[in-house]
Image (tube, coloured by chain):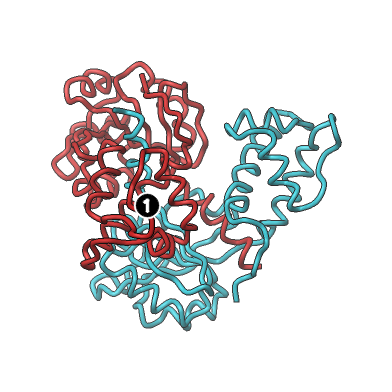
Chain colours: A cyan, B red
Amino acid sequence: MVKESSVPEVVILRLPLYIRALSQMSAEGKTVISSKSLGSRLQITPAQIRKDLSYFGRFGKQGRGYTVDSLIETLTNILGLDRRWNSCVVGVGRLGKAIINYPGFVPEGFKIISAFDNDVNKIGQSVNDIKILPMNMIRSTVEKHDIKIAILAVPATSAQNVITELVDTDIKAILNYAPIAPKVPPTLILRNIDPVLSLQSMTYYLQ
Amino acid sequence: MVKESSVPEVVILRLPLYIRALSQMSAEGKTVISSKSLGSRLQITPAQIRKDLSYFGRFGKQGRGYTVDSLIETLTNILGLDRRWNSCVVGVGRLGKAIINYPGFVPEGFKIISAFDNDVNKIGQSVNDIKILPMNMIRSTVEKHDIKIAILAVPATSAQNVITELVDTDIKAILNYAPIAPKVPPTLILRNIDPVLSLQSMTYYLQ
């Protein structure tokens, strides 16, 4: 089962941004920072940052700011990013291949272990040393390799069906690249990557 | 210049979601819907939906709900989605190619017109009938084809420099696939597509 949480989801969504900004500041040699300087980098108000962090206890001292490295470590622990998360890619078209070859996952602890497709011409081929397996092997493969995350790169028309297949496996989180908003049961976490939504929220400012 | 707005950006970010859900409901034959049924589909509270829409005037009648097609049309006009937006891709690696070939943009009014790369081995080649041009042709090409949107698929190490080059062109909106949060001047709109951030906001629930 997926963990219940009393922390609002929008707060959880911001924590990775905090970690990233803090890591940049740490790399720049900063050891202590204020909520104002962190907020300025992220275009989030200092009050919002203080409120978000308050869900997880007391950080920093009044007027002294936050210790950068210790805040990074705490947030990393809170999000469960102090371990490796095995992942798989479902759908190995152009996008799926780009995802498998994307170098940004491993340094952050996300390792793509397996790839699945239902195209018999692709099954058995390898992408970046990962062999493409048939869809009917998802359940056993996911169990064997302790894979909890599936990255979905199938066409929009297949996404909902694939998700229905994933419900019966050990997959607990889905990162969906298909341009639809699929329905998932409460036992699954879903994030949609959707370039069209992002584009549509920019044109408002261009008129 | 980019339009100033008194509407909170988070509200603008939700409007495309409303349009998409309403379009699905329209396709299902629904003509009038309540904020409750729209909210249920999007996992957003009815009060939030009513508040968001209130920024743009009065929609629906007390207890009668919203007329689906007329709300779609109004939101489409508000976001400037009743026209075509010419776009370009900067960086034509595996990801850039997947983006150029992505069939989901054109039906939503976003047409990729040009592609740019600084790799001499790629310049002159074509992807999906779009010829890859050298970076020094961005400014003139963007002007000639009325391109306002750039989709960035360059490595993280190049993203900030490319954005600096774009500041002096007619590009006003950037959809950034590079896994960094680049700084942009207030004359540019930026949206980051970042799979790692999405993954990092899911692991919290998996522990």
Quarter-of-image position of residue B164: top left
B150, A100: nearer the viewer = B150
- How far across and down, in percent of the image, does residue A25 sit? 68, 32
A96, B36: nearer the viewer = B36
Q: Is residue B128 left or right of residue A142?
A: left
The N terminus of chain A sits in image quarter: bottom right
Residue at left 63%, top 48%? A15
**Mark 1 Cα shell of 10 Å, populated few (<14), some (14-19), many (≥20):** some
Residue at left 74%, top 29%? A30
Q: Is residue B173 left or right of residue A59?
A: left
- How far across and down, in percent of the image, does residue B180 sit? 51, 38
- How far across and down, in percent of the image, does residue B145 sit? 17, 25
A71, A126: nearer the viewer = A71
- What residue does disc 1 label? B17
Residue at left 49%, top 63%? A112
Label 1 amino acid? Leu
SS label for mark 1? helix
Q: Is residue B139 above or below residue A137?
A: above
Q: Is residue B176 above or below residue A81?
A: above
Q: Is residue B32 left or right of residue A191?
A: left
Q: Residue furthest top?
A: B168
Chain of the residue under the numbered disc 1 shown in the image:
B
Task: Please state the total of marks drawn on the protein image.
Answer: 1
Q: Residue furthest front?
A: B62
Q: Is residue A42 above or below residue B18?
A: above
The C terminus of chain A sits in image quarter: top left
Residue at left 26%, top 67%? A157
- How far across and down, in percent of the image, does residue B201 sit? 57, 55
A124, A91: nearer the viewer = A91
Quarter-of-image position of residue A115: bottom left
Q: Is residue A163 left or right of residue B179?
A: left
